[in-house]
Image: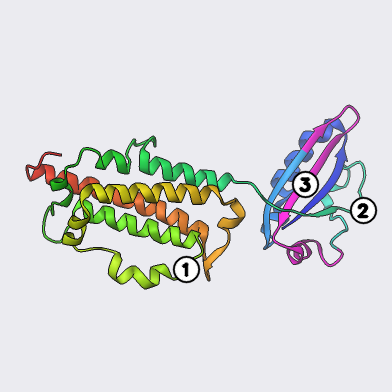
Amino acid sequence: MITRIWHGRTRPEDGDRYLEQLVVAGTEEYRQTPGNLSAKIWRKQENDACHFWTVTEWDDLPSVKAFAGDDFRRAKYYAEDRGILLDFEEHVQHYECFDVSRTKIHHYLYQLEQTYHGGNWLDESLLGKLDGLTSEQAFATPVPGVHSVAEIVWHCIYWRTVLIHWLRGDNVYRDETRARLNFLPLDVLQAKGWEGLRLELENTQVTLRALLLQKDDRYLAGEYQPGCTYEDAVAGTIQHDIYHLGQIGLVLKILLVMGKTV
């Protein structure tokens, strides 16, 4: 990743006007250029001048050249800059940038924890739905063609396990196991036992949290297969949990209507 930094100055009284110009139009070409990752404006007010820096991040040097041309070290100015900038510095600075932030990682960890333990604005969670369920209730099939809570929980365990394998670099586990493990027969799940399933679900939560804590945001942009990023996989697994959290709620309501205490 490449960071490009431009610096310019205005009179103090022109600082707000130039800031508005940069926000509205001055950074538009940055943002429209393929390969631009971000555009920020820094400002520092001093007694004799107002300093501005535009700090942009790019995928690579060809992306920078797509914006600035082959002579990419030369600063680029616009007609609107005339009459407001105090000087026109000839060159800009470029730096290799290594992003070690974990903002996205912590965002997904927060969602993962809320979906599992609770604390979101709906105050709904997997544990909130599952705590207090008896084995009989968990394995009960509400109506023909509708999965039991235990079957849904196993389905979530399976896809969480797929994500664990992806995060560990195993990109073939899903394709090798999906047909036989995506949903298991009820008798196989009953052999595992309800508490056994609960423990497997808990283990996936602990493992996913530990694996994600080892990653940074750059990792999320990597691909576990062409066109599919690790961020897609993490976000998709959380969305999958949320979808089936709602499904579990519906199954429990059906069981309640059927007269089974939940």
Q: Secondary structure at mark 2?
A: loop
- Residues at marks 1 and 3 touching, judged by CB atoms closer than 8 Å: no
**Magenta span includes 179:** no
Residue 21 can be seen in this image? yes
**Residue most extreme to the left:** 259
Q: Say which residue label 3 marks.
A: 54
Percent x, y of residue 3: 76, 53
* Residue 171 - label: 1
Which badge, 1 or 3, is on the more N-terminal residue?
3
**Mark 3 vs 2, N-terminal side:** 3
- Disc number lying in front (1 or 3): 1
Bin the neighbour count of mark 1 within 10 Å (Cα to Cα): few under 14, some 14-19, many 20 and up. some
User: Mark 3 and mark 2: span between their CA atoms?
Assistant: 15 Å
Q: Which mark is residue 90?
A: 2
Question: Looking at the image, which residue is at 86% across and 38% down?
Answer: 10
Report the span colored magenta: 43-71
Residue at screen point 17% across, 56% down:
190
Give coordinates of residue 142: x percent, y percent. 12, 52
| Amino acid type for the residue under numbered disc 2 | Glu
Q: Are marks 3 and 2 in contact (CB under 8 Å)?
A: no
Residue at point 28%, 70% (across, down): 180
Vertical arrangement, residue 13 with respect to residue 223, above or below: above
User: Residue 257: x percent and y percent?
Assistant: 10, 43
